[in-house]
Amino acid sequence: MKTQRRVFCKKETKDFVYVHQLNLKLPQPQNLERALEQITHVFWKIISFKLFNLAIVQGLNGLKMEFNHGGSTRGSKRPRESEDHPASKQSKSSGKSMSPQQALAQHGSKLTLFEKAEIVTFPQIYYLGLEANKIGKILSTTSGPNDGYDDSEKFYIHRMHDHISYRYELLESLGKGDTSQVFKALDHKTGAHVALKIIRNEDHLQIDAEQEIQLKNNANAVEILDSFQFRNHSCIVFELLARNLSRLKFETCYKGFTPQQVKKFIIPVLQCLQSLSQKEIVHGDLNLENTLLKQEYRDEIKVIDFGSSLFLNEEGSTSPYLQGCAYRAPELILGIEYGTPVDMWAVGCVVVELFTGQKLVPGEDEQDQMACILEMLGKPPNGYLQKATRAKEFFSDKNNMIPAYCEEKTKKNGKKILVPKRKESGKIRGPPGTRDLELVLGMQGAVKPVFLDFVKRCLHWVPEARLKPSQALAHPWIKKMRSKSLTKNGNVGGGGGVAFAGNVAA
């Protein structure tokens, strides 16, 4: 008898495709879904023989597995409790684990070819994501970037309820930024819900991730629970927090909070910055989205996202890429050496935004951002621009500090004035110094001078003149004000009607 060939050979007829290796007679597919079902049927037959041989080699005597259509298993001597093992469950977690060999023997039919080779490198298996729509579940994953697990931008292609590192179950997306994705996940080892951050597969971002891990254990910073590499991606596991302050602002219909509430929100942020500044660390991305409630309707705040944080060196730094545009300090825009005071500039912006419900410096781009700062603060001090490497991009006359968005005109009496240039699109900003910060805050109601003083001392052209975190914590607005009301409308969270914690005070 001639042995069968080890390759697929097929010939098409009008109605059928014959796959000779397995003697299968499959109907010609009429659509993609039916075609995938047929291919799955063929592949399970092939894998069953390979896994059976593998089990024999590994010494799993007595194990006999058959695979029916769809990949379920039947074993003549398989332990009855294997079906109930926590690693195979989708909704429960008991902290129990199995070895890679047990996982292969009991659930190998539902793992991809890639996972079968990968799983043996993990000492313990807590979760397999068996019901997830896995990448490579039907075909091999070698055709795409990073074995098919990355998209064109090198983000990890996730599947909900699949595993990460055979321990964490992806439950829902919490957000996506330029460098990473964050998911709510279930830790099947501890049973806790966590926030799982998966960094893009870029070498320089892996270095940033390592630095972020080193920044743990700072006051009021989000707690890092675990970190590891998975499929060429750095992953960081954090405690799962509640809503961020941006969400809370939205729920007030952008009306903002009372000064008392704002103070309660900002104290933990200042404590975190104080801890960082003592180590000469810049957070670099402080904003409402990166300040979160630890628990719903409680006032404890945690600071997150240290991916942009920097250890200051002796020579300083002039990178313009820290901080979001609305919170970016002028020295970052202009290319002047910066330090921890950039975070205090961001504090000033955050305080005003929390109070008014609107961004203080809502620039559409860097040019417009600088125009907003000039409109609010006026011209910078003499000599300020001498060390600015990007001054020519924002000032048409650096010596006389004439902004690029303005032109100088002479009145009939000979007095020279600055007039904003016409723009094809976007809002026209006023000349330097024409937007009074006191009016911006005062429109929201009576503002105490001590509150205004705190904000002004955060928003200063000269970094050294800004409040340091320790000075901010000792400022009279922080220390002496006492709460008289909970919120402007009696509750936090808008239509929810649930009162914020009663110890909110300022």
Image (cartoon, rainbow, N blue to C red):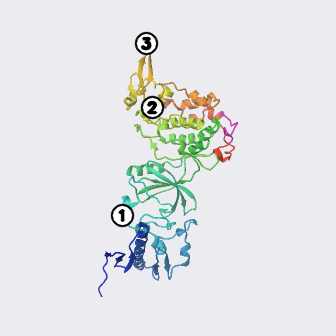
Q: Which residue is mark 2?
A: 370
Helix or strand or loop: what does disc 2 sit on? helix
Q: Give the residue furthest to the front.
A: 14
Residue at 53% over, 34% down: 360
Quarter of the figure with the N terminus: bottom left
Question: Residue 199 location in percent, x, y?
Answer: 44, 53
Amino acid bearing label 1 = Thr
Question: Residue 27 location in percent, x, y?
Answer: 40, 75
The magenta segment: 480-490
Q: Nearer the viewer, residue 192 or 171?
A: 171
Label 2: how many Cα within 10 Å (few below 14, some 14–19, many 20+): many
Alpha-carbon span between mark 1 and mark 2: 48 Å
Which is closer to the viewer, label 3 or label 2? 3
Amino acid bearing label 3 = Gly
Amino acid bearing label 2 = Met
Helix or strand or loop: what does disc 1 sit on? loop
Alpha-carbon span between mark 3 and mark 2: 28 Å
Helix or strand or loop: what does disc 3 sit on? loop
Q: Nearer the viewer, residue 405 or 302?
A: 405
Give the quarter of the image for residue 120.
Answer: bottom left
> Is residue 156 shown to the viewer in this render?
yes
Q: Which residue is mark 3?
A: 414
Q: Which residue is mark 1?
A: 142
Q: Is residue 184 above or below residue 76?
A: above
Labelled disc at residue 26: none
Image position of 445 (left or right of 86): right
Question: Residue 321 location in percent, x, y?
Answer: 42, 40
Question: Residue 159 location in percent, x, y?
Answer: 47, 60
Alpha-carbon span between mark 3 and mark 1: 74 Å
Magenta stretch prevailing secondary structure: loop
